[in-house]
Amino acid sequence: MTQTLPPVRGTLTPNRPLADLTWLRVGGPADWLFSPADEADLADFLAAVDPGLPIFPMGVGSNLIVRDGGIRAVVIRLGRGFNAIQIDGDTVTAGAAALDAHVAKKAAEAGLDLTFLRTIPGSIGGAVRMNAGCYGSYVADHLVSVRVVTRQGLVKEIAAADLQLAYRSSVLPEGWVVVSATFHAAKGDPAALEARMVDQIAKRDASQPTKDRSAGSTFRNPAGFSSTGRADDTHELKAWKVIDEAGLRGATLGGAQMSPMHSNFLINIGGATAADLENLGEEVRKKVFQQQGITLEWEIMRVGETLPE
């Protein structure tokens, strides 16, 4: 890309490979990678840059396949200037780059219950955009408001209700960057909250391939809600169940595999390309539809361009 971009105080890197910034360790380069110094740097950049230039906000890459041809856009990745966590009474305000797990731990230390965030991979910006949730709790249950920088460089505070948060979705406009989010949390005993999080981690590690290169759940549950983690949880329309019933637990393509430990986890077993991962996922979707008439929807976001055959 030959386009001249406005000056910044953060870092702006051309042709930056993205594989090392995603949990699956795949993907081609971004035309530009921008790490703004702070909110003002981000707002100034978006106000000054060509309005036709695509902007892609990226979190920690925990729920993302970047295709092998890379992304024709300015990828914005928030760093240290955006990871503060502030607690005031029963509200927690976290920067978009703060890790979900850190927010849960910091809140628990202050006697506030955001424990559902403890086992959700990724950062707060992505959690808001996807209305992340587990164990029957979602971002929507706690979110008060978000602070964003629009594609035009305006800073806005948006009430949670205006985001129309639903199962794994929100209506945040394209190119808008979440910079922080404010949550309301119920009070709890710090020791009890800590014990609950320890238990959640143990359950997760016993059932999910947390040591492998994955991007969390591959497909949304056809039932339209997350696992509750309770004894009365139903598994009828869980993604892993329909994948198992199609005989695809452990299925491989190149360096990609549907995890033998949890069949709704797509993993890079070594040397996978983004095409291997996406094509295996598409094969799973096709077979599940052929055999059961169920259309699995991707939960992992796939972005960028494929390489020519």
Image (cartoon, grey):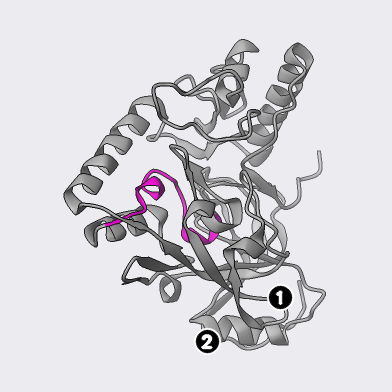
Residue 92 rendering spot, x and y as whole percentages? 38, 66
- The answer to which of marks 1 and 2 sits earlier in the sequence is 2
Give the magenta range.
112-126
Does 266 appear above or below 25?
Answer: above
**Residue 88, image quadrant:** bottom left
Disc 2 element = loop
Separation of residues labelled 1 and 2 (CA atoms): 18 Å
Does 168 appear above or below 229?
Answer: below
User: Where does label 1 land, which residue?
Assistant: 151
Q: Residue at x 53, y 35 (%)?
A: 226
Q: Which mark is residue 223?
A: none
Which residue is situated farthest in the left direction here? Answer: 191
Are there few (<14), some (14-19), or many (20+) residues within 10 Å of tag 1? Answer: many
Q: Tell me the amino acid under the disc marked 1.
A: Arg
Magenta includes 114? yes
Magenta includes 119? yes
Name the front one of labels 1 and 2: 1
- Answer left or right for 118 relative to 130: left
User: Where does label 2 land, which residue?
Assistant: 9
